[in-house]
Amino acid sequence: MRRLLRGLRRVILWAVAVVIAVYFIFAIGLTVLEWIVRDNPKVADSLQAHSTERHLLTHFDHGAASFQRRLELIESATRSIELEFFIYNVDEAARLITQALMKKAREGVKVRILVDFSAPVFELKPAYARVLREAGVEVRYYNTSAVYRLVSIQHRSHRKLLIIDGTTVLTGGRNVGNDYFDLSDHYNFLDSDLEVSGPIVRTILESFNVYWSSHLAADPAVDATPNPDAERFAAAANDAAMLEKLRAAGEAYRASHRAHECRDLRFVTDFPNHGEASRNVFNAIVGELAAAKQEAVVETPYFVINKGGYAVLDDLHTRGVHVRVLTNSLGSTDASYAVAALYPWLGQLARTGLTLSAYNGQPLPQQSANLAGGHPRWGVHSKRGVIDGETTVLGTYNIDPRSANLNSELILVCRGQRELASEVLASIAAREAASGKVIERGRIVDRSALLGAAPITQRIRFLLEMPIANLFDFLL
């Protein structure tokens, strides 16, 4: 027995030593990046813009309707189509999008796709890129660093863009995949996008070109062998029926939503580079919140606050600005480790005076279509907020250290447009109504609401993840 206990103690000590060593590798490596990475002033003007010219903005909080709008925009293109995504899955949603893109490329429209090469989610492998290339679609990958480069691979492009003819853009939280468009039978996201038409789209296109041409973008490897995956994007028997359902969802959405005119519009994105010094979006959001006078309403799939985030919350509380946050519960999230990193800090969050709600994982029929059937879980995935009922912020930025310090993100900010802000607030309120209140104006109401209806197996995993998630929270 003593020998067994000594052996167990050695295993535990070795495990602790490995965890501490890995922690210092990340911590020191990311610190060194801050010393050697600097902003590139040559591209700064392509990464942010402010316009007081007329822009039309349409808000999409319905997955199927947003998918249908993508298909319509692609079909309307006459000169160019640019797509940039963190995730480009190979599933039904990707098949329908890819078919539409290849059709336009064969018609002579220039089509370019830039997709992040993050190993845990990457699916658009060179074999698929070859199918696209043969149809006339250009594909590049962002940050193809090898897995063993533990520090440099932490930087990812989390940007999401569909740009049509350099005049219209659709951006927000949605990647290309079934989960984002009500097409999964096991898990779907409640998300949101903005469609923007107007002069600022030229700068957004310039930012795409900066990422497309950056030293971190690379062409897929050339493979001349027979391609067994060539049929993955071919039409399927049920495509016509699905397209009809999407068309109906799109028409129903347009009947109850309209475009809003914005004459005070701001676009901000990060530099395509490693290091906190290359991040612009966090500072832009802090600047918008500094102007808040009464209320800031925020929706984010993950809510992991770092030191800088607490400073912002404390400042808002001191100035009498009420912060209302909607995020996922353990029962609705796709990332239980993010909830594990949030749970122990509820007391400290409460001291900032905010209100925190956690989504319960149930469907929300007015904002989703559940086209695949079954009984999927639902989770919030929007990255949006409203300040003082008149400034709308929407983009790709999650409230977590990864978006603040590591990922490339983008946001759009429309000021002085109360009708758009009211529409976004109503959408968030509908999701809050299907949520549990965790903290209300600085008082912890129900810690268990953050766990939601998660099954016991997920709760056990959550408890096991908690120490590691809090140790490595800067990577979440």
Image: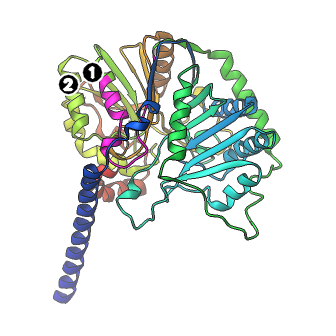
Q: What amino acid type is highlighted by mark number 2?
A: Asp
Q: For label 1, count other residues whose C-alpha is less than 10 Å away and answer few (under 14), some (14-19) or many (20+).
A: some
Q: Secondary structure at mark 1?
A: helix
On the rendered structure, is 304 left or right of 334? left
* Relative image position of residue 452 (x, y in whole percent): 40, 41
Task: Give the mark, 2 or 1, whose residue is nearer the N terminus.
Answer: 1
* Relative image position of residue 26 (x, y in whole percent): 28, 59
Task: Tell me what residue is drawn at x 75 percent, y 40 percent.
Answer: 100
* Labelled pair 2, 1 in contact (Cβ < 8 Å): yes
On the rendered structure, is 71 left or right of 407? right
Q: Is residue 383 visible?
A: no
Report the front residue among 150 and 36.
36
Task: Tell me what residue is drawn at x 50 percent, y 23 percent.
Answer: 427
The quadrant where residue 65 appears: top right
On the rendered structure, is 118 left or right of 274? right
Is residue 165 one of those drawn in magenta? no
Q: Is residue 412 visible?
A: yes
Task: Please provide the residue range marked out in magenta.
Answer: 265-287
Q: What amino acid type is highlighted by mark number 1?
A: Ala
- The disc at residue 290 is 1
* Relative image position of residue 239 (x, y in whole percent): 79, 44
Q: Is residue 67 above or below residue 323?
A: below
Q: For label 2, count other residues whose C-alpha is less than 10 Å away and answer few (under 14), some (14-19) or many (20+).
A: some
Task: Tell me what residue is drawn at x 28 percent, y 39 percent.
Answer: 305
Q: Secondary structure at mark 2?
A: helix
* Relative image position of residue 221 (x, y in whole percent): 61, 63
Q: Which residue is mark 2?
A: 315
Residue sitting farthest toward the front: 42
Is residue 271 one of those drawn in magenta? yes
Q: Is residue 183 above or below residue 395?
A: below
